Image (spheres, rainbow, N blue to C red):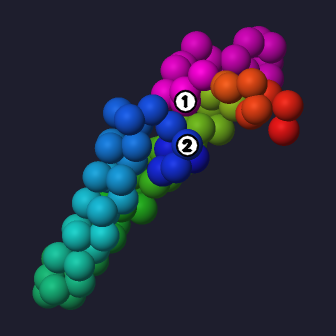
Amino acid sequence: MGLFYATRKRLIISWCVSIGVGIIVGIVKKLPPTSRCILDAGVVVGLSIGSLSILYHFIKSIVTGKLPNIDPCLPPLTTSAKTN
């Protein structure tokens, strides 16, 4: 969502992260197998913690009935966008 219709700051951050991940993947592919396996294990742990965090906040918002107070960095709606 932050790659197209977002504030300038969000666009820059989103595109830099996406390009950075691609560069890191290219570098990791050139590592020896042992190092790559260690990094892969770290990625699995990180993704697992992130997934559990999302699940925790989802369940918390359902139980409390209150959405998190986080700025999505989206520009304000224009008149034409409100009608569509």
Q: Name the residue under label 2.
A: 5
* Outermost residue to the right: 83
Left or right: 42, with 2 as reference point: left
Main SS, magenta residues: loop
Total count of labels: 2
| Span colored in magenta | 59-76
Q: In this view, does 48 lie above or below 78?
A: below
Q: Mark 1 points at which residue?
A: 74
Is there CB contact under 8 Å for labels 1 and 2? yes
Name the residue: 42% across, 62% down.
Answer: 44
Q: What residue type is labelled 2?
A: Tyr
Residue 37 among those drawn in magenta? no
Mark 2 Cα shell of 10 Å, populated few (<14), some (14-19), many (≥20)? few
Q: Is disc 2 placed on a helix, strand or loop?
A: loop
Expressed as whole percent of the image width and height from the top left, the position of residue 80 reads 76, 32
Expressed as whole percent of the image width and height from the top left, the position of residue 32 reads 14, 87
Q: Which of marks 1 and 2 is nearer the N terminus?
A: 2
